[in-house]
């Protein structure tokens, strides 16, 4: 069981917006602004899309945005495109004995 | 362009030690950042294994700590992972990655911004 909770799947139509949640505790998501999001296509390495809750690395589309409220972080993808279909993982720093924890992953399907 | 490339045997026998190396190009491993390992069992999610700084400061996943050693070789600009007493549960794609960190007296480990393509390791006799 992952330390961070994500929905197993989300879906949306091209052009729509979707949001993926990542729920933790005050020891991780709620306590620190070190939440990051990764996109992973099958057979490929994960790609960083958002770090420090809401910062986009250079080269990442502004269709990707991140936010946090309390113990829940969110990744929003606007203007869905077919190429966005992938797995998405969140991760956070934690003050527990395991300083890095991942969410279980969310499969995004573009209908 | 920063690139990371994992290397090591693709097949390891149960009870033996898995050894992987991550070669870094386009960036000096001594210029900052942490360097880490993440694995992904077939059909499953990502699991952080360990991270290391150029100075040798290390952080380990407690669930693996008794079996894991992470090390850095600044002369070769690479870092390595050793996982002992492997079982079938250690079968996974192993990725190396560069990691952001925020250090005061201790360090808060952040995002993995650059990843290697990953190497599949199967544990089987």
Image (tube, rainbow, N blue to C red):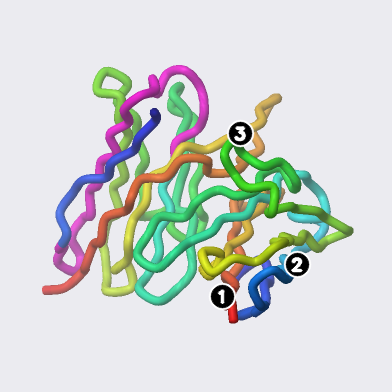
Please provide percent x and percent y for residue B23.
28, 34
Distance in Å between CA atoms under marks 2 and 3: 22 Å
Q: Is B2 on the left or on the right of B32, as rendered? A: left
**Quadrant assignment for the N terminus of chain B:** top left
The nearer-to-camera label among 1 and 3 is 1
Which badge, 2 or 1, is on the more N-terminal residue?
2
In the picture of the structure, the residue carrying the numbered disc 3 is B101
Give the residues drawn in magenta, as a range: B11-35
Please provide percent x and percent y for residue A69.
88, 58
Please provide percent x and percent y for residue B92.
32, 66
Q: Residues within 10 Å of mark 2 (few under 14, many from 20)?
A: many
Residue at 56%, 55% in the rendered image: A38
In which chain is the residue bearing label 2?
Answer: A
Is A92 situated above or below A4?
A: above
Determine if residue A27 is in view. no
Distance in Å between CA atoms under marks 1 and 3: 28 Å
- Label for residue A107? 1
Front residue of this view, candidates A28 and A22: A22
């Amino acid at each position: 069981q992952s330390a961070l909770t994500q929905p197993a799947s989300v879906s949306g139509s091209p052009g729509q917006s979707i949001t993926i949640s990542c729920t933790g505790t005050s020891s991780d998501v709620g306590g620190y602004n070190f939440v990051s999001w990764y996109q992973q296509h099958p057979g490929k390495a994960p790609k960083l899309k958002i770090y420090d809750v809401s910062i986009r690395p250079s080269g990442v589309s502004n269709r990707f945005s991140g936010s946090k409220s309390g113990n829940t972080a969110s990744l929003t993808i606007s203007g869905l495109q077919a190429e966005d279909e992938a797995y998405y993982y969140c991760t956070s720093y934690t003050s527990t004995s395991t300083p890095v924890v991942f969410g279980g992953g969310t499969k995004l399907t573009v209908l | 362009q920063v690139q990371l490339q994992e290397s090591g045997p693709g097949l390891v026998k149960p009870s033996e030690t898995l050894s992987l190396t991550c070669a870094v190009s386009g960036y000096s491993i001594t210029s900052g950042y942490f360097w880490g390992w993440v694995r992904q069992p077939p059909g499953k999610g990502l699991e952080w294994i360990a991270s290391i700084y150029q100075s040798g400061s290390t952080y380990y996943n407690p669930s693996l700590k008794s079996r894991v050693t992470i090390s850095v070789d600044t002369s070769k600009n690479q870092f390595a992972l050793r996982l002992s007493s492997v079982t079938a549960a250690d079968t996974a794609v192993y990725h190396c990655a560069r990691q952001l960190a925020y250090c005061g007296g201790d360090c808060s480990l952040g995002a993995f911004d650059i990843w290697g393509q990953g190497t599949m390791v199967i544990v089987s006799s």
